[in-house]
Amino acid sequence: METALATRVRSFGLVDYVPLVAKMREFTLNRTPETPDELWVLEHPPVYTLGQGADPRFGPKMANGIPVVQAERGGEITYHGPGQAVVYTLVDLSRRGIKVKPFVALLEQCVINFLTGHEVQAERKPGAPGVYVGGAKIASLGIRVTRGRAWHGLALNVDMDLTPFNAIDPCGYPGLNVAQAKQFGIKGTAKEIGIRLAWLLVHRLEDA
């Protein structure tokens, strides 16, 4: 569905999780039907986030000094840290005529297309939102929709310390391996790749 409002891509750098989510919530609650959609590209300092209704059995299973924060998105536990490209998708789904499941699929396809462009074969898994390479999860998704407007978004592992994932069952799947773009020879910082991913998403949204 076409929209006359251009989508804005904003880069925030390294930002603490809690104040950034408060800023995202404020944007979502105060936006009007005329507010342009925005994609926020950033990284977080180390933090575990628990989705609504997350099962505490999935971790963290050991103390490692990393804070645990209750999130307002869907899904189970995941980890954010420096070197991971986070793209928060503040998108008015109602205005664009996009339902939640197709929107999640659109986000996944954007990541898949990015990786495929670097000759990395990526795929979805039925019933397990995210993007996988060789069975290992390389990108996670968690969306919240308020009054027809989406917030939260996706996280792509780029060049980070993956050790903290060992303390959890990522996204609620025991033994799930994780991967990152660096190991497949994809060059670029989390910021650079996050911005490229955001613009790919802009183009997919305009075609939706």
Image: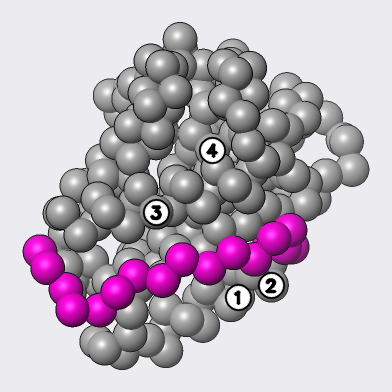
Density class for disc 3 (Cα within 10 Å; few <14, some 14-19, many ≥20) is some
**Which comes sooner in the sequence, label 3 or label 2?**
2
**Kind of residue at badge 3:** Trp
**Which comes sooner in the sequence, label 2 or label 4?**
2
Q: Is residue 71 left or right of residue 64?
A: left
Quadrant that contains the N terminus: bottom left
Q: Which residues are magenta?
A: 1-17
**Which comes sooner in the sequence, label 1 or label 4?**
1
Do the CB atoms of the residues marked 3 and 2 lie less than 8 Å apart?
no
Q: Nearer the viewer, mark 1 or mark 4?
A: 4
Give whichever of 25, 60 is nearer the camera: 25
**Kind of residue at badge 2:** Pro
Q: Disc number at residue 94?
A: none
Q: Which residue is mark 4?
A: 156
**Which comes sooner in the sequence, label 4 or label 3?**
4
- Residue 120, above or below 101: above
Q: Nearer the viewer, mark 1 or mark 3?
A: 3
| Res. 96 image quadrant | bottom left
Q: Which residue is mark 2?
A: 19
Q: Which residue is mark 3?
A: 199
**Which comes sooner in the sequence, label 1 or label 3?**
1
Quadrant that contains the C terminus: bottom left
